[in-house]
Image (cartoon, helix red, strand yellow):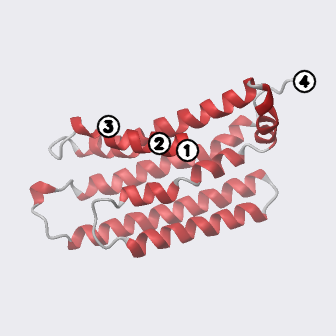
Amino acid sequence: MILSFLSLLIAVQDFWWFLSPNDPWIILAFYGAVFPFFGLVASVGLIILLSAIIRPLRPFYSRIRQDWTQVSLGLIGIMPLAIIIGFEEYPNTEPYAIAASLVLAASIWFYLRNDRSWQRSLALFAGVTLSMAVVTLGKGIIYSSLDLPWEDRFPLQTEALNTVIGWVVLVIIIFSPVVLKFLPKTDR
């Protein structure tokens, strides 16, 4: 997971330079929501692949194969950092970040209390959906109260769409274990 945190930070910091507030808002929203997940998903995929190949790590891989929702849970574990990064340029975000993190903590608690993978995925889905709703509401409230000149900030629809696209990516990540269950199993 350390690689995931690093890849998220690198993606956010290094490649934002070629965008400006004058670019079309849809491009800004798509980039801001999707690009940080490329490094995250790639590093987690690499860790899973290496655990399947390297013999001492195979017990870890076999446990993951028994319950793929653990991968989703691990990826949801980075959400508090993503929430903080999402609110980075806003003042007075603490109540919204804490509320969104508490919603995520409750969904993880429900995840741990259920045994079936569909219930676990549903708990994570509900948590991500509610926490992203808190983030979107918080951004809207804070954005409307900002006292910056209009040329110094991104349009409000960019901020809202950024959060919605991020939610869609997270939902795909959460429900991907359902698809992974259909992968062929080997005898080893």
Q: Amino acid at mark 4?
A: Asp
Disc 1 and disc 2 in contact, CB within 8 angstroms: yes
Q: Amino acid at mark 2?
A: Leu
- Give the CA separation, mark 4 to mark 1: 32 Å
- Give the CA separation, mark 4 to mark 2: 35 Å
In front of the other: 52 or 128 = 52
Q: Which of the two discs, 3 and 1, sits closer to the camera? A: 1
The residue under label 3 is 14
In terms of sequence position, does the residue under pointer 4 or pointer 1 come before the other? 1
Q: Secondary structure at mark 1?
A: helix
The residue under label 4 is 187
In terms of sequence position, does the residue under pointer 4 or pointer 2 come before the other? 2
Disc 4 and disc 2 in contact, CB within 8 angstroms: no
Expressed as whole percent of the image width and height from the top left, the position of residue 46 reads 61, 30
Q: Residues within 10 Å of mark 4 (few under 14, many from 20)?
A: few
- Give the CA separation, mark 3 to mark 1: 18 Å
In terms of sequence position, does the residue under pointer 2 or pointer 3 come before the other? 2
In terms of sequence position, does the residue under pointer 3 or pointer 1 come before the other? 1
Q: Residues within 10 Å of mark 2 (few under 14, many from 20)?
A: some
Disc 3 and disc 1 in contact, CB within 8 angstroms: no
Q: Amino acid at mark 1?
A: Ile
Expressed as whole percent of the image width and height from the top left, the position of residue 18 reads 22, 35
- Give the CA separation, mark 1 to mark 2: 6 Å
In terms of sequence position, does the residue under pointer 4 or pointer 3 come before the other? 3
* Residue name at image x 55 percent, y 71 percent: 102
Q: Which mark is residue 6?
A: 2
Q: Amino acid at mark 3?
A: Asp
The residue under label 1 is 2
